[in-house]
Amino acid sequence: QVQLVQSGAEVEKPGASMKISCKASGFTFTEYNMHWVRQAPGQRLEWMGWINPGNGDTGYSQHFQGRVTITRDTSANTAYMDLSSLTSDDTAVYYCARDAGYTFSRHYFDYWGQGILVTVSS
Amino acid sequence: DIQMTQSPSSLSASVGDRVTITCRASQNIISYLNWYQQKPGKAPNLLIFSASTLESGVPSRFSGSGFGTDFTLTISSLQPEDFASYYCQQNYSPPVTFGGGTKVGIK
């Protein structure tokens, strides 16, 4: 069955960078785009960006002003999301999610990771 | 960015009630509208895509309708496991954006 298992640090300091991983199983990793979505406490879901694991192409939300970088390791079936220059506004649950489109992007999401709450605090 | 507005932000209902949630887009998104259910502490779960297509495994009491800017999610007969938050999402134009959510609580 499809599984997305996330890992990463749960507390970060202001000004630091965070990195979260998302290990995929149960499907061919290179055939589905992967996305990152976050949810700050009490706020709506916010899309951050996507990666095509097959060729490494990426796309990002301009709201993050170049602070987000998404990469992948196809040998490990894992996607990564780096977010730099952290502030308290970046405190949120971060999710990876699989695009519902097979070999092309539909930009909606049929499987999600369990989410990681990252708190940015000094 | 396309703004998505949901109403109501919360509602209280009883088991067996018919529940309707609306989502309005700030511009025409044709039928590029999806609905998710989220329970506390859990990731969202896709219910409906392309405004009215039920995701595999989702109970038939859930249905979606709408076109253009106005959309509706309906639960025909609310079940105990349906008490959750619901979010709409547009995938017409990047960046994809979500509604503010509707929390369905127990009356």
Image (cartoon, rainbow, N blue to C red):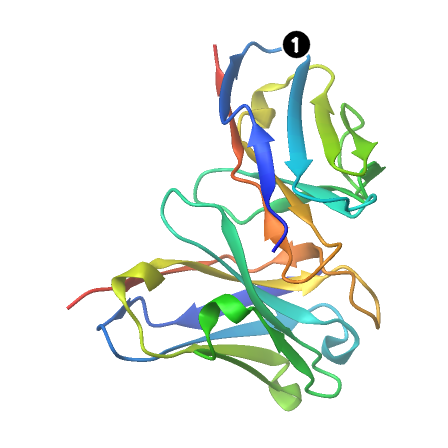
* Residue B21, percent from left and from top: 64, 25
Give residue B26's quadrant in the image: top right
Q: Residue at x 31, y 66 (%)?
A: A10
Q: Nearer the viewer, residue A40 or B4?
A: B4
Q: Provide the secondary structure element on which disc 1 rests.
A: loop
Give left or right: position of A14 versus B103: left
* Residue B88, percent from left and from top: 64, 40
Residue that carries the numbered disc 1 in the rendered image: B16
Q: Quadrant of the N terminus of chain B?
A: bottom right
* Residue A26, percent from left and from top: 72, 68
Q: Residue at x 63, y 19 (%)?
A: B79
Residue A47, compared with residue B40, is above or below; it is below
Label 1 environment density (alpha carbons within 10 Å; few <14, some 14–19, many ≥20): few
Q: Residue at x 74, y 16 (%)?
A: B76
Residue B86, compared with residue A10, is above or below; it is above
Q: Residue at x 49, y 66 (%)?
A: A63
* Residue B93, percent from left and from top: 72, 58
Q: Which chain is indicated by disc 1?
A: B
Q: Amino acid at mark 1?
A: Gly
Give residue A31's quadrant in the image: bottom right
Give residue A121's quadrant in the image: bottom left
* Residue that sits furthest to the left in the current view: A122
* Residue that sits furthest to the front in the current view: B27
